[in-house]
Image: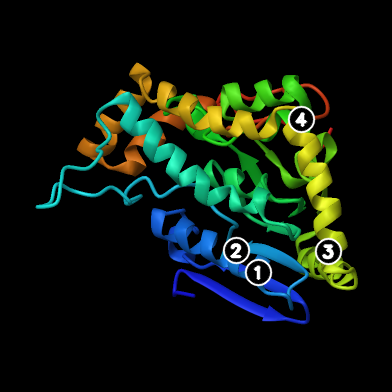
Amino acid sequence: MNDILKYEVKDRIARITLNRPSKRNALSFDLLSLLHDALWESDEDRTVHAVILRGAGPCFSAGYDLTNFGGIKKKTAFGTYRGMRRFDDDAWHLERAQRLRMAIFDMHKPVIAQVHGHCLAGGTDIALLCDMVIASNDAVLGFPPARDLGALPNHMWLYLIGPQWAKRLTLTGDTITGEEAAQIGLVMKAVAIEHLEGEVEGLAKRLGEIDQDLLSANKRVVNLGLELMGARTLQRLAAENDARGHQAESAENFRRTMKESGLKKALLERDQKFGDGRAKVVGPELRDEKGVLKDRDS
């Protein structure tokens, strides 16, 4: 496909790998576009029964590439294109990017997310649209930008973990481990990192033994059930709601700090007051004076 996304088909399985390890697989517009095309290619290919979506390097994806998201045209001799200053323009760009991600939900064949390391912000937007998510026990999942930058432009959290945990995690931007994510249903299953690839490949191999038309029928009836519960409409509204979130004063402050002092400084100012930024699924959240959780295993 391209240097930033790898695509291979073998033994009835398409493996799509986000390949920007030096950028922690940050999702640029170009990468999302290539992912969209690879997903539909695998859906059309009759030799493919299932898709594995994974990330190269130390993590699945640390989120969107805030320094170089792209996809915005400049003024040319042919016309003046949408920027980001108006609410409607912002919503338009968010909806366009969402259409690229929604291929995961809309395609007929099952997609398994193989999650390791950080799966944050935009990383969760694509992972949670997958039909099944298998994570390493020590993976880190969450949406820290909800603390100051906007809302979630895709929102499967409500359908996977219910309103209370969805609020607990998205209102604070706190993160949980892959093991904890499995406990509340945010991911289907968590295993030790050394077993992750084998677990995912084993499931994909089993799917490869099923008639493609049956895979399609059984995936789509579940997704139609989600649609009857409003899931697809909520995704559409989530993009517009994110544009609303971008109007917050904190979002403007984040953008100003990033422009004046760089992304690292903006992230530090946002996250340092939250200590280690972690939530705890089981047991009390006892923290030290720096906001770091004590005894996470109790």
Element class at badge 2? helix
> Which dot marks residue 40?
2
Q: Earlier in the sequence, mark 3 or mark 4?
A: 3
Element class at badge 1? helix
Residue 31 seen in render: yes
Q: Nearer the viewer, residue 108 or 120?
A: 108
Residue at 45% across, 46% down: 97
Give the residue type at disc 1. Answer: Glu
Q: Nearer the viewer, residue 269 or 181?
A: 181
Work out how far the residue at label 2 is from the one at label 1, CA to CA, in angstroms. Answer: 6 Å
Give the residue type at disc 2. Answer: Trp
**Picture layout, residue 46 above or below residue 252:** below
Work out how far the residue at label 1 is from the one at label 4, CA to CA, in angstroms. Answer: 26 Å
Give the residue type at disc 4. Answer: Leu
Q: Earlier in the sequence, mark 1 or mark 4?
A: 1
Element class at badge 3? helix
Work out how far the residue at label 3 is from the one at label 4, CA to CA, in angstroms. Answer: 22 Å
Residue at 33% across, 51% down: 71
Instruction: Give the left or right position of residue 283, taking residue 130 as reference.
Output: right
Say few, some or many: other residues with alpha carbon within 10 Å of mark 3 (under 14 / 14 to 19 / 20 or more).
few
> Which dot marks residue 123?
none
Tell me if label 2 and label 1 are in contact, CB under 8 Å.
Answer: yes
Element class at badge 4? helix
Question: Where does label 1 land, which residue?
Answer: 44
Q: Earlier in the sequence, mark 4 or mark 2?
A: 2
Give the residue type at disc 3. Answer: Asp
Residue at 23% across, 38% down: 259
Residue 191 seen in render: no
Question: Where does label 3 land, which residue?
Answer: 213
Q: Earlier in the sequence, mark 3 or mark 1?
A: 1
